[in-house]
Image (cartoon, rainbow, N blue to C red):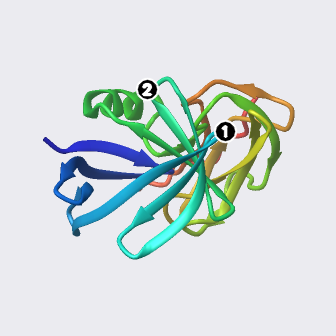
Amino acid sequence: MKKIFRLGEAEHRCSLRRGAEGLVLETDAGPLHCALLPLGAARHRLSAGDEQAEALIARHGERLWVRLRGRTHVIEAVDPLDALAAASRHGGDGAQAPMPGTIVSVLVQPGAEVKAGQDLVVMESMKLEVTIRAPHDGRIAAVHCAPGDQVPPKFTLVRFATAEGSAPEIAA
């Protein structure tokens, strides 16, 4: 059975199974043979296909933080019903905090046009700086955080304008 996982703002359907030669990650793009070798103190050697890299991996609840090649990735299992409920609660499209933390800087303002991958907010959590990036091109409708704010996981930091073009708001 395939599961839905969120990596950053993107959702992926995949499954992990044991194969004759180790772990096999099944995705829509096909199977990928992989291995994870613990090196101690949260360090691991990750092999995927012909690629190898060292990664720092930490788990907290249902979330997995992976520091790989200079970037921190948050991976979490997504319940499709929870995703639908969150979208309706937050008025649709937004960028959320992947973990609890403190806002370091806000790099956009309401009304700003942004491109996919553009930096929106920098936050600090567990002594790591995490940059929240735009999941797609769009216009910022509201910014719901400011430097120094403490935010819980899944808090909507930035909301995008809807297709109908909602007017920008200034967060209180």
Question: In this image, 129 relative to 92: left or right?
Answer: right
Q: In x, y percent, where is residue 158? A: 62, 44
Dot 2, crowdedness within 10 Å: few (<14), some or many (≥20)?
few
Q: Amino acid at mark 2?
A: Arg
Give the quarter of the figure containing the N terminus: top left
From the viewer's perspective, is 111 left or right of 6?
right
Secondary structure at badge 2 equals helix
Residue 20 seen in render: yes
Labels 1 and 2: the sequence-earlier one: 1
Q: Position of residue 121 (x, y in %)?
A: 72, 49
**Quadrant including the C terminus:** top right
Instruction: Identify which amino acid the numbered label 1 is placed on.
Output: Ala
- Is residue 161 found left or right of 81 in the rendered image? right
Q: Is residue 122 left or right of residue 24?
A: right
* The image quarter in which residue 116 lies: bottom right
* Mark 1 neighbour class, 10 Å CA radius: few under 14, some 14 to 19, many 20 or more: few
The residue lying at 64 percent from left, 43 percent from top is 142
- Nearest the camera: 122 or 22? 22
In the drawing, what numbered circle is on residue 106? none
Provide the residue designation for mark 1. Answer: 41
Q: Residue at x 62, y 40 (%)?
A: 42
Q: Name the residue tied to disc 2.
A: 89
Where disc 1 sits, the SS reads: loop
Distance from the alpha carbon under mark 1 to that under mark 2? 39 Å
